[in-house]
Image (cartoon, rainbow, N blue to C red):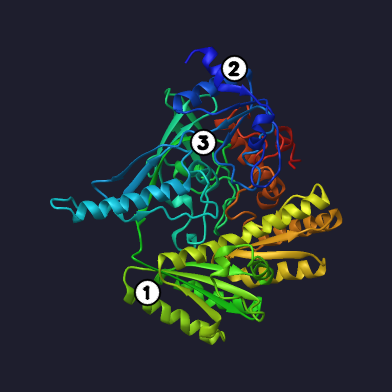
Amino acid sequence: MERDDVQDLVRPFSADYRRYAADESRWEGYAEHIAFPRDEAEVLRVLELCASRNEAVTVQGALTGITGGAVPQGGCILNLSRLNRIYDIRVHPDSRQVSVRVQPGVLLRDLQFTLQQAAREAVENTASPGGQRGGDIGRVFFPPDPTESSASLGGMIACNSSGAISFRYGPVRRYVVALRVGLVDGRILELRRDRERAVGRRFRLRASDGSVLEGDLPAYRYPRVKSAAGYFIEDDMDLLDLFVGSEGTLGIVLDAELKLIPVPPVRWGILAFLPAEGDAVALVEGLRPLKSAGLAALEFFGPNALRLLKDARARLPFLAELPELKKTWEAALYLEIHAATEDQAMDLLERIVDLLEEAGVTEEDTWSAEDRKQMGRMKELRHAVPELVNMQLETLKRSAGAITKLGTDMAVPDGRLSDAMDLYREGITAESLEAVSFGHIGDGHVHVNILAHDQDEYLRARRMYLQWARRIVAWGGTVSAEHGIGKLKVELLRIMYGDKGVAEMFELKRAFDPDLRLGRGTLFGRPSAARSGDAR
């Protein structure tokens, strides 16, 4: 590609591209240039041009994030949406592990469709005369299931995304087999799980040009709960994991190999309604141990989440197909069973029913789903709540001006769930605020979305939010379990790791990005602020 072609690829940023200045947080940034490369070679040429200008680079996928990580703060936007090829699905001959190789711009829903199509083709091939056995590849899936199926796989890797069934299956990190990573200066790293490892807290990686990157990993202790806050660090770690959850600040995912696992033949859903939030929290303690028996999801809906669904019944057609929500229901738990056989599923269901009955939940207080259509409705129901919250926040923002979303993404260890729920409820009551609570309660990870009606409420809510973060961290929890820090939650990273931990993280970034041009503002705030301990 000649220089004129590169100049054409890297276009001046204008009003025509304004939608690329913000993510789902609705927080808007700015840029001087934007590029939509179509392959790895074009990515590298864009990086070369940006290096010659000493220009910052912000990597984007599908812009479904809610913490501003892909929102530019000057420089060039590197949008990877056109790197959207699914290369192949393969079975490794030794381990029989199934994996798929993808480019970073592939959307989750497109991967899901491709896997479903492969399953149908496998069945057809097996059934045809002389057909080959296709089951090894056909009946597999990629477990991470964030609310936004329009998320890009590169973005999901960057944030170590998760979803409802991550209660059983874990986040994206567990499924990343290999990465091809571009550094901001154009060098390439080839990383494969179990191949490149740290020695204690010391790392050493060889780039494509033969150069070596080496240094010390941060000394902080990464939380032992579901977390997406800062760089994942542990002794003798797999160095591939540095880049999973690094939020586009260390390198650019150019290519990924992802592990796929067998689809559970039996999948059932149960929605159990309870008269009070406290009843739901108490029930969770008994349900959690059933994860090993096949409980795949354990989700929570608080009182105001159910009210939003009631109020939206006339607007959302799928809700009209479901029974009406009773006034006596003040909380709900969604449970999903995954099993190899119906007998196994029935055994687990009986154990769940026993716990529900002990909690006073009758058959009339439950909805069930046993087929694909019913399970789809349950998924729509779960996903409707955050969408309805965002719609309400948009309305409030129009009337109250510069209010941004205040939603917790914190998680606590198992023994602290009740304490955390009390902390949230008591704070909201004391400050006379409105909030909608829902989320992944099985992981101790409940989203509390505070609906501030004016600037005074917003400022009071923000002070309370920071107090919550300090308490959660003191309990051994995390300030972000799935959405990451981005640019909007930088203050929380310092609460979690302290000035020393953030400084060590910053030095790790400098090993891969000495000029601090990649993902400027993400994790650390302004570059000068990160060094001075005044990140905002």
Q: In terms of depth relative to the viewer, which is nearer, 7 or 277? A: 7
Q: Quadrant of the C terminus?
A: top right
**Residue at the spot 62% in from the left edge and 65% down from the top edge:** 438
Residue that carries the numbered disc 1 in the rendered image: 345
Residue that carries the numbered disc 2 in the rendered image: 52
The secondary element bearing badge 1 is classed as: helix
Q: Give me the C-alpha separation between circle 2 and circle 1.
A: 60 Å
Camera-nearest label, 1 or 3 = 3
Residue 199 seen in this snapshot = no
Camera-nearest label, 2 or 1 = 1
Q: In terms of depth relative to the viewer, which is nearer, 413 or 363? A: 363
Contact between marks 1 and 3 (CB within 8 A): the answer is no
**Badge 2: few (under 14), some or many (20 or more) residues near its Cα, within 10 Å?**
few
Contact between marks 2 and 3 (CB within 8 A): the answer is no
The secondary element bearing badge 3 is classed as: loop
Give the amino acid at mark 1.
Ala
Residue that carries the numbered disc 3 in the rendered image: 81
- Looking at the image, residue 500 lies above or below residue 456: above
Camera-nearest label, 2 or 3 = 3
Q: In this image, 403 relative to 524: left or right? A: right
Q: Give me the C-alpha separation between circle 2 and circle 3.
A: 24 Å
**Residue at the spot 66% in from the left edge and 76% down from the top edge:** 330
Question: Residue 65: x and y, percent?
Answer: 60, 46
